[in-house]
Image (cartoon, rainbow, N blue to C red):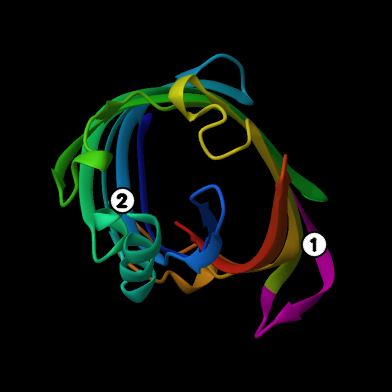
Amino acid sequence: FPLYLEGFLGYARYDPRYVASNGTDERRFGARWNNLSGTIGIGWDFPLTDTLVFRPIFNASLGYVVSDAGVASFLLQQHFNRDLQFLDGGHMLAGGIGGSVMLDYTLARPAYEIDVELRYTQLRLTALDSSSRAVQGEADPASLNLWARVRWPTPWGVWGRPLRWVVDGTHTQYLRPQRGALGFDWLTKVGAGIELDVAKDEIGPSWFQLQRVRVMGRYLFGANVSGWSVGLGISF
């Protein structure tokens, strides 16, 4: 059945370091941000070949960010006479709708599996509620993303289930207002890990059964930015 559904729910905590100056004095301070965001999507698959699908998707997104800089904000206002209200317990709720178009290539063979997706996404986001006028307004973020993943069997199994090697990578170009907003125009992420096939266990209802569990390590890099992560992923 060609109906396509997707969803994302994520939590992130950032601890960026800033340098503030009034021309003579300098102060370094942190401004911890907590972010919770979710996106849902519904689309339809139009097969172009046996392995290639064209997929338009409607998306809706909602996100909430709150800062807990506290003391740092107070000290900066005292020394530099800056209005940094948002950093001191500030918050913002933003949401919007948009869409994506995707080309999805899938090739499954006994010796390996290849998945490749080329996707363009654009949203219209609006600040629904904010504690500071500095972070109110609207934005039209857009991105172009190329993602690929390759799986192949290992010589081993776990509890009688197949165990696979997995490598993947993604490259994202940020467009429109996002381009350069955080100091970079693009990001690349590469990763490797293992994947356990649990499809035979029939975990969950027939229409939403757990298929695979992955443990991945990834390295991210771009202009003026780099980092790493370890993640747990599941496929239905």
Q: Is residue 16 left or right of residue 117?
A: left
- Which stretch appears magenta? 146-161
Residue at image position (59%, 68%) is 231
Q: Quadrant of residue 142?
A: top left
Q: Quadrant of residue 33?
A: bottom left
Q: Position of residue 20 (x, y in %)?
A: 50, 54
* Residue 53, above or below 15: above
Local SS, label 2: strand
The residue lying toward the viewer, choosing from 135 and 211, is 135
Q: Main secondary structure of the magenta part?
A: strand
Which residue does the numbered mark 1 point to in the structure image?
153
Regarding residue 188, the answer to whether it shows in the image is yes
Residue at image position (19%, 47%) is 132
* Residue 147, above or below 47: below
Which residue does the numbered mark 2 point to in the structure image?
38
* Residue 3, above or below 30: above
Q: Is residue 30 left or right of residue 140?
A: right
Q: Position of residue 227 (x, y in %)?
A: 69, 59
The residue lying toward the viewer, choosing from 8 and 106, is 8
Tell me which label, 2 or 1, sits earlier in the chain.
2
* Disc 2: CA contacts within 10 A as few (<14), some (14-19) or many (>=20): some
